[in-house]
Amino acid sequence: MRQIGSPADHAVAGRGPIERLPMIALVDEDAAWRSAAAAALHACGFRVEVHRSIEALMTEDAAGVPDVLVVDASAPGVDPLGLHAGLRTDTRFARCPVLLLTGREVDEAVDRLCEVGAVDVFAKSTRWVALSARLKHLHRLVSVQRELLASQERLAIVYDSSRAGSFDFDLDAREFRGSAGSFAIMGFEYPRVSISEHEFMRLIPDEAHRLELRRRTQAAIRFEESFSMDLPMRTIAGQRLVARVEVDPYRDAGGRVSMLRGVIRDITDRVRAEADIERLTSADVLTGLPNRNRFIALCAEAVVAARAHGGRLAIVALDLDSFRRINESLGQVAGDEVMCLIGERLSGALAAFSARGAESGARPAREPLLARLPGDEFAILLPRVRDQAEINALVDSLLVDFRRPFAVAGTECFVSCCAGIAVYPDDGDGAGLLLSRADAALAAAKALGSQTVKWYGSMRKAGTGTRLTMLSGLHKALERGEFELHYQPCVDALRATPVGVEALVRWRRDGVIVPPIEFIDLAEESGLIVPIGEWAIREACTAMRAWHDAGTGIPQVSVNVSTLHFERPSLAQTVRDAIRAHGLSPGMLELELTESCTVRDFDSTLGALQALRELGVGLSLDDFGTGYSSLSYLTRLPIRKLKIDRSFVRMLGVSAEDEAVVRAIVALGRSLRLHLVAEGVETPAQARTLLAMGCRDMQGFLFAPAVPAHELVATIDRIRAIGAVTTPGKRAFETPVHGAVLSGEMR
């Protein structure tokens, strides 16, 4: 056992007593992770003891009783249910909260423990700030609960002696006779010593409680059983109170139950203390939203309901990006205000979502539930969902809402977020398990950058046996010729003229197209994206040569290049060889890179881009507006085209904020003399707005989807035919001929 961050580390000469730092007992057999976690938590203000196993924790001498135990749930020999029971038998750990570190697979026992509040769960990672926030929250929560319980016990002692009284209820006279204390509780002044049954019942305002008291009284008489119950009452002055009545039946000389004797206590303050405990342990103090414990409890109820009705539910975990900067710039008070504003905005968005669904008759009776988790995370429970599209619609609308600024402390703050999604029953059948898996998906989304959404299901499919099977299939796909390129035209919307085509990789596995979302990430992680990209460049050049020889008039083909491929020095040579092998003019090939390429290693990226530019190859920046590019980077990059991301285009005419973003991108592109292309154009209204802004070149279903190479020429001819019959005074995309396209002819 080794201790990091002892009190001596924080002692300051002449400053008086040292404030005690929270003690963390960290149990993990991975020495490297254990050491890194201990150092990171020490830097965050904890004292840390490290142990290699539970046995070592129980047998080694400790510097003190820990405030929180952190245990790796996946370590050999760790049974969460047995662990919890075993720790409770040791006086040192009897009241110590436990944080279990888990991987993606959370044991069902852990899930059950979470739902009864015995432990908390954290996905094992190197997210030290998030781990620190969870530990501080857990420590604070338990401390508050202990203080309130102590206060409750003190109140009970005081009020049990001063706010209690004995009574007799005469069954023959139907009369309540009591001590001065019992009548004082009910608000009567001394020397009142008796009231009728009718008068006593009038002090119980709720009819249900009156009926329950009569039922229990009759049972006590009939079966000679004692009972106790809590009664909400009113004093004769109308003041509310809660009284606990404890009753015993009493026989007379003839052996008949003729009297009920008991004690009445005023437990109002105790009930309030219990309510305070419930509120503080189930609600976030800052926002008033349900906290993690309450959220898991409500999710557990929703899972039970979904299981009973064969329904589905989803949990969405949201994490704010770089929220710490607001606290550092404006202070903690302003940061708290922004957090409250975020909670209000999310609540409003969920209410609007439910209202829209109610109007269409599609929404269930149970409303979405919003909760605030420790740190800067929120979680949403969607108690009944129909399909993935419904969840996507909500999450997309939330991300759009986040783009609006928050006004606080006389300034505007901009906050973005990422989302992780888990679905019952696909991703798990317990509340804690689903939240943990939504957190795992969230962590994967954050690794990909701001405004990213990740489904746990897609990770799971690429996770166990399916992942290995797909990876094996990817390795063999190139050899078997299973990859193919589909091409989507880029169109001058004003003249209905194709100005190029974009090549998109498709995998036809066993005769079925595998969606790119299911294999592209896996190809990136495994490095297979590089040979796939090299194949795509050669294949696109082959097709371009054939189109050029056939006189189709297609001026250019563009190929997406992954960040990983872009960092390889072989890319320039691959491009050079492909152009030469097919006798193409360099300008016939364009490479599309994402914004993430420009920030990972800008100097290296700049050199690679300049080498490609010297070959004469066109370069474009894809999905512009969703990444991290700054103006200073953009002015130095040798690119000639910006592609406006479809997420902004989709909201044209819907969101004024997104329209302002598109307008700004167009203005920026024109000022830098860059070519502009809008992606994902699906409606004439979107096209009209883009043209009014000065963006003529567009891609999307309004003009054509991506089609196999053998269908492209016919698709291009249809687009040109629209331009040829365009009614004078109308733009090409508004013609009756194009209406056939929209109705499904080209989709």
Image (cartoon, rainbow, N blue to C red):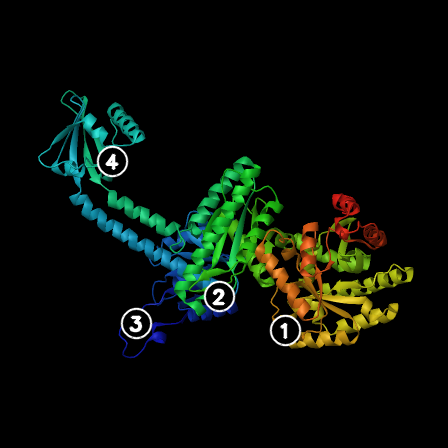
Front tag of 1 and 4: 1
Residue 351 at what x, y percent from top left?
49, 45
Q: Is residue 352 left or right of residue 485?
A: left
Q: Secondary structure at mark 1?
A: helix
* Quarter of the view holding residue 93: bottom left
Front tag of 3 and 1: 1
Q: Secondary structure at mark 3?
A: loop
Look at 45% across and 44% down and name the residue there.
298
Q: Earlier in the sequence, mark 2 or mark 1?
A: 2
Separation of residues labelled 3 and 1 (CA atoms): 49 Å
Q: Are marks 4 and 3 in contact (CB under 8 Å)?
A: no
Question: Looking at this view, is 78 or 435 the one in front?
Answer: 435
Q: Single out the residue that lies furthest toward the left.
A: 191
Look at 24% across and 40% down and name the residue there.
241
In the rendered image, which residue does mark 3 sit on? 18
Q: Secondary structure at mark 4?
A: strand
Front tag of 4 and 2: 4
Q: Is residue 170 left or right of residue 743?
A: left
In the rendered image, which residue does mark 2 sit on? 128
In the rendered image, which residue does mark 1 sit on? 633
Q: Is residue 526 visible?
A: no
Mark 1: few/some/many CA within 10 Å (<14, 14-19, 20+)? few
Separation of residues labelled 2 and 1 (CA atoms): 31 Å
Separation of residues labelled 3 and 2 (CA atoms): 25 Å
Mark 4: few/some/many CA within 10 Å (<14, 14-19, 20+)? many
In the rendered image, which residue does mark 4 sit on? 233
Q: Earlier in the sequence, mark 3 or mark 1?
A: 3
Q: Amino acid at mark 4?
A: Met
Question: Looking at this view, is 309 or 737 the one in front?
Answer: 737
Q: Single out the residue that lies furthest toward the front.
A: 729
Please tell me whether residue 451 is drawn above or below residue 668 in the rendered image: above
Q: Earlier in the sequence, mark 4 or mark 3?
A: 3
